[in-house]
Each structure stands twice: as C-alpha cells, then as structure tokens.
Image (cartoon, helix red, strand yellow):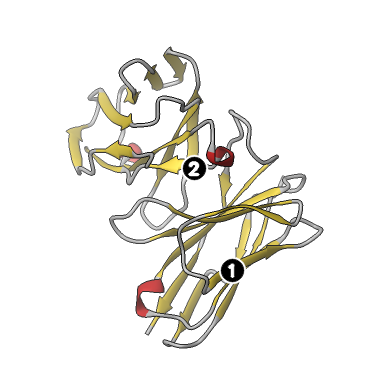
C-alpha cells in the first residue's frame, strides 16, 4: 500500500506570494492533518480534515487555509507569505478522525523557504 | 493549556547502552500516548503507542505509562547508531476532538 505523498517536496517563494501544498493520504484513510515544523519546535498543528470537513484548527492566522476533496486528497494554502513561514510542512493521514488509537502516518513533507 | 514536556537533549550515549526517554504531560484526561521517531531531514514515523498503565514491549523498545504520575517513557535496549534520531512524544486528550498534542522532541545520539 502506498504511503502518504506530498507535493512539491521543496519550494522557494518570496515574501507576499502565496503557495499551495498538496497531500494524498494512504488509500482508505479519510482523515488528513497538517503540521508546521520549524527547527527546535515541536509539531505545530494547523488543521485536520475528515470527509471534506475541517474538524479541528490550530492557532494559526487566517492566511493559512486548507481543504479536502472527495477522494480525501487535501491541499493547504498560505497567502501573503512571511519569512517566518519558512518551515517543513507535514501532512499526516489516519484511517478515521478521533478515537483513542488512531495512529497518524506522515508524508515526507514539503520544505518551504520564504526569501 | 495542555502541555507535553520533553528534555530537548541532545542525549549522547555509547552503543549498546539502555536509553530512557521521558515525557511528562499536564492533562490528566489524556487517554493514549504515542512515540514517534524522526531522523534528520525526514518525517516522523510511529514507533509504538500505549494506553494502559504499565509496560508495552516491541522488540528493543518498551513504552512505560504511569497515568498517576503523568509521565510516559520509552526505553531502548541495546541501542544502535541507527537509533540516533529525535524522539517525539504525543498524546491524545479526551477533548479537543482527539487532536494529538506533541512534545518538542528529544534528540538522541548513539556513539559507535
């Protein structure tokens, strides 16, 4: 079974631009979560989607948005990029939303650099 | 605010040593706990999860949970250089729509 895929793997943008990242979950998984990871920081939760609905949202500004399609693929968008948005963006899929033992499986990440 | 605390390290030990990685948490209602390993430049991968008090063993890894003291630990026996990575602790509280809460991770270095 193929794992979680993320595209693109690397991205370089300039301040003020916007960016769209894509995530395809493991086949059969319906929940997709997005995280931001910066050096020295833990995983910072962005949002979670399940069945095309945003179930949960972290403490990020409205410049960060996402959506999920009927095939469970998800995209996140960051508008008006700032230098501080440079990070590794990780997508994780799980079989279902919530639940005690609902493990998350991570994609390889998209490394975004904002110049 | 729910928190998960881990010693950031780096923790440096010789090959073959027993390593104990610790994680404390503030939310008494937390139900399940996860240990992930993240190699430099890679994404986290699940090592194991635990939800009952006591020990859970999987090969060279043992997770230990003590809900009364609010800590969870990961023991690595016969540590190998390939175990060198950052170890992330995560928990799933009862509320917050079951969203995982993550620690910042402990960097582990196993010296040959």
Q: Is residue A64 left or right of residue A40?
A: right
Q: Which image quarter is the C terminus of chain B in?
A: top left
Q: Which residue appears farthest toward the right when viewing the image?
A: A70
- Give SS at disc 2: strand
Q: Is residue A20 left or right of residue B39?
A: right
Res. A92 mark: none
Q: Say which residue label 2 marks.
A: B45
Location of residue A37 by image quarter? bottom left
Res. A65 mark: 1
Q: Nearer the viewer, residue A80 or A113?
A: A80
- Give SS at disc 1: strand
Residue A14 lies, in percent from the top left, at 43, 87
Rendered residue at 49%/33% (across/down) = B93
Residue B52 lies, in percent from the top left, at 48, 15
Disc 2 crowd rating (10 Å Cα; few below 14, some 14-19, many 20+) is some
Q: Nearer the viewer, residue B61 or B50?
A: B50
Rendered residue at 20%/44% (across/down) = B10
Q: Residue under mark 2: which chain is it in?
A: B
Vertical comparison of B55 with A28: above or below: above
Vertical comparison of A13 with B4: above or below: below
Query: Marks 1 and 2, how far apart in space?
Result: 25 Å
Callout count: 2
């Amino acid at each position: 079974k193929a794992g979680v895929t993320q595209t693109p793997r690397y991205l370089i943008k300039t301040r003020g631009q916007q960016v769209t990242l894509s995530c395809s979950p493991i086949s059969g998984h319906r929940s997709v979560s997005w995280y931001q990871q910066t050096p020295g920081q833990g995983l910072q939760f962005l949002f979670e989607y399940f069945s095309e609905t945003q179930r949960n949202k972290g403490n990020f500004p409205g410049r960060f948005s996402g959506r999920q399609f009927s095939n469970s693929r998800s995209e996140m968008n960051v508008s008006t990029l700032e230098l501080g948005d440079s990070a590794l963006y990780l997508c994780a899929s799980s079989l279902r939303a919530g639940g005690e033992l609902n493990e998350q499986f991570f994609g390889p990440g998209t490394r975004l650099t904002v110049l | 605010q729910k928190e998960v605390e881990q010693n950031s390290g780096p923790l440096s030990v010789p090959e073959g040593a027993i390593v104990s990685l610790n994680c404390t948490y503030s939310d008494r209602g937390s139900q399940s706990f996860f240990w992930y390993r993240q190699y430099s430049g890679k994404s986290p991968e699940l090592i194991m999860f635990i939800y009952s008090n006591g020990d859970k063993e999987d090969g060279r890894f043992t997770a230990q949970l003590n809900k009364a003291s609010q800590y969870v630990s990961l023991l690595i026996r016969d540590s190998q250089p390939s175990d060198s990575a950052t170890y992330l602790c995560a928990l799933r509280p009862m509320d917050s729509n079951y969203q995982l809460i993550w620690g910042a991770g402990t960097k582990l270095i196993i010296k040959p």
